[in-house]
Image (tube, rainbow, N blue to C red):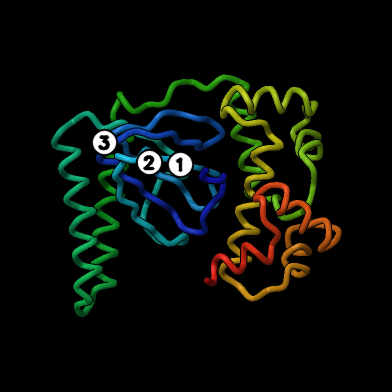
């Protein structure tokens, strides 16, 4: 299972084959061939493709001067010319990255700029104007944005509900209807994802990671990880370095 998480960079994902599920902007939706997904930096998401799924991801650093959308977008591209155009842009960027030629960075910025233009042109089309979201979906999106900002504070789900001026029951019901997961599940997934990243990519002690993620003690952090992954932090770290 792919856990809910966010990235420090923008992502443009181009699905060329297969089907899957996407959770983005507080809502779950189906994925299929010729779907383009733009995920701004620090936007909570998860994506699962089936075994036959094939896609390409373009990573664009945050802070770039490119004119990129400010909100997540999921586009189903039906026009064959538009499909071919984006595939060509992505493949050209891949060739440039692999060639290691002089001025490669400048060339990659140029390719990213063209992808930005392609994306904004698609968004302008009537067929890609998003439907009006229900109040429940809007609440779910606000909650997911808040999780990205505050997951490391150690605050429970009820604190998020209070900040959103709703009851925990109402928040759980709205998020469950929009994403298929409870609000507590999403918060837990984000914390578990970050813990696994830190255990697998840094030398920080479990106690330090626990403190960073808002846990009151290393012992509680260990029990939390054991419960949600089936392994203690030491085993997760060993598995990553084996």
Label 3, on which residue? 34
Disc 1 to disc 3, how far (Cα)?
15 Å
Label 1, on which residue? 47
Label 2, on which residue? 37
Secondary structure under badge 2? strand
Q: Earlier in the sequence, mark 1 or mark 2?
A: 2
Where, by quadrant of the figure, is residue 232 drawn?
Answer: bottom right
Q: Nearer the viewer, residue 127 or 198?
A: 198
Residue positioned 19% across, 64% down in the render: 95
| x and y, in percent, of residue 94 in the image | 23, 61
The answer to whether residue 237 is above or below residue 149 is below
The answer to whether residue 129 is above or below residue 159 is above
Residue positioned 17% across, 44% down in the render: 85
| x and y, in percent, of residue 103 in the image | 23, 77
Secondary structure under badge 1? strand
Are discs 1 and 2 less than 8 Å apart at CB?
A: yes
Q: Earlier in the sequence, mark 1 or mark 3?
A: 3
Question: Tag count in the figure?
Answer: 3
| x and y, in percent, of residue 183 in the image | 68, 34
Disc 1 to disc 2, how far (Cα)?
10 Å
Residue positioned 73% across, 68% down in the render: 206
Would residue 200 appear left or right of 206 to someone viewing this image? left
């Amino acid at each position: 299972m792919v856990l809910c998480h966010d990235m420090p960079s923008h992502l443009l994902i181009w699905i060329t084959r297969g089907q899957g599920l996407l959770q983005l902007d507080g809502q779950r939706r189906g994925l299929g061939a010729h779907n383009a997904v733009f995920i701004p930096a620090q936007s909570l998401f998860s994506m699962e493709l089936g075994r036959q799924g094939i896609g390409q991801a373009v990573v664009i650093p945050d802070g770039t001067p490119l004119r990129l959308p400010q909100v997540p977008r999921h586009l189903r591209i039906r026009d064959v010319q538009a499909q071919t155009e984006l595939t060509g842009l992505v493949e050209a960027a891949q060739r440039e990255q692999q060639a290691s030629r002089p001025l490669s960075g400048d060339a990659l910025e140029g390719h990213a700029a063209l992808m930005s233009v392609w994306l904004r042109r698609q968004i302008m089309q009537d067929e890609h104007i998003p439907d009006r979201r229900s109040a429940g979906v809007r609440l779910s999106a606000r909650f997911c944005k808040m999780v990205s900002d505050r997951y490391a504070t150690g605050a429970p789900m009820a604190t998020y509900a209070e900040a959103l001026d709703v009851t925990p029951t109402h928040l759980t019901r709205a998020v469950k209807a929009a994403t298929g997961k409870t609000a507590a599940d999403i918060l837990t997934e984000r914390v578990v994802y970050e813990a696994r990243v830190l255990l697998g990519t840094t030398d920080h002690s479990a106690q330090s990671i626990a403190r960073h993620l808002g846990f009151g003690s290393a012992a509680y952090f260990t029990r939390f990880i054991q419960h949600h992954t089936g392994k203690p932090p030491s085993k997760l770290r060993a598995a990553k370095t084996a």
